[in-house]
Amino acid sequence: LNLESSLLSRNGFIGFFHDFLRQAVEKRYLATRKEQTQVHTRLADYFMRISKNQLRIVEELPWQLEKAEQWERLYYLLADISFFQLLYQHNRYDLMTYWTSIETNSNFRRIDAYSQVSKNPERVPLWVLDALGIFYKETGNLDEGMKLYKAKERICRSSNDLRELSRSLNNQANILTDWGRHNEAIQLHKDSEFICR
């Protein structure tokens, strides 16, 4: 109660109103890196025990694992395609940040994590192929992104899903543009336009 004027409530979570208070508490209770890592690990363990489809889990669990430097656990969490879907929909930039931390601090790689999607693209919803393709494109893995878009194209042609086929062609064209293959990109955009018309 004495601290009430120094605390801030954000969506039901209490934090410090001033950073100097946060620093003082950290200095008193979590002075060493070992203590900080232990607390982050304990919190990550707690969040692992409760359902992964809650927004709080999506926000907290990967963050706690990153702060605890639990790279293997974070890798397998993000490699879970259902968790990938949740985090991508919530904040795909956090997803990129976590993968950067993993790849900077370990031998785990995002391409290995999602290799099963590339091998069996028909097992995931089409929008996941789009999301993973965009994720690869935005992180410089253009070859992997193109593989997913081509797989999506095959699936769409076989199911006669013209709307998603058009999207796939446009996404492929965007990668071709990045590669400097403008004539091929223009042709795919024209094909997409024809489908839309």
Image (cartoon, rainbow, N blue to C red):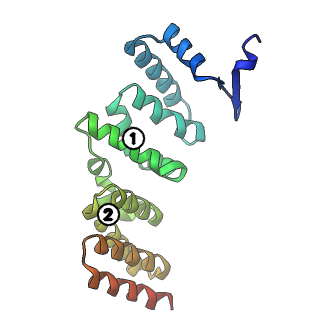
x 45%, y 49%: residue: 93
Type of amino acid under label 1:
Tyr
Question: Position of 140 compared to 49: left or right?
Answer: left
- Helix, strand or loop at mark 1: helix
> Of circles 1 and 2, which is in front?
1
Dot 2 alpha-carbon crowd within 10 angstroms: few under 14, some 14 to 19, many 20 or more: many
- Chain-order first, disc 1 or disc 2: 1
- For label 2, the residue is 145
Question: Position of 149 compared to 164: left or right?
Answer: left
Q: Position of residue 120 (x, y in %)?
A: 32, 61
Work out whether 51 lies above or below 31.
Answer: below
Q: Quadrant of residue 20?
A: top right
Dot 1 alpha-carbon crowd within 10 angstroms: few under 14, some 14 to 19, many 20 or more: many
- For label 1, the residue is 98
- Residue 65 visible (yes or no): yes
x 51%, y 14%: residue: 26
Q: Nearer the viewer, residue 192 or 148?
A: 192
Q: Nearer the viewer, residue 20 or 26?
A: 20
Q: Position of residue 181 (x, y in %)?
A: 24, 78
Rendered-image quadrant of the N terminus: top right
Q: How many marks?
A: 2
Q: Position of residue 179 (x, y in %)?
A: 25, 71
Work out whether 138 lies above or below 4.
Answer: below
x 53%, y 40%: residue: 58
Q: Position of residue 182 (x, y in %)?
A: 28, 81
Work out whether 184 lies above or below 138.
Answer: below
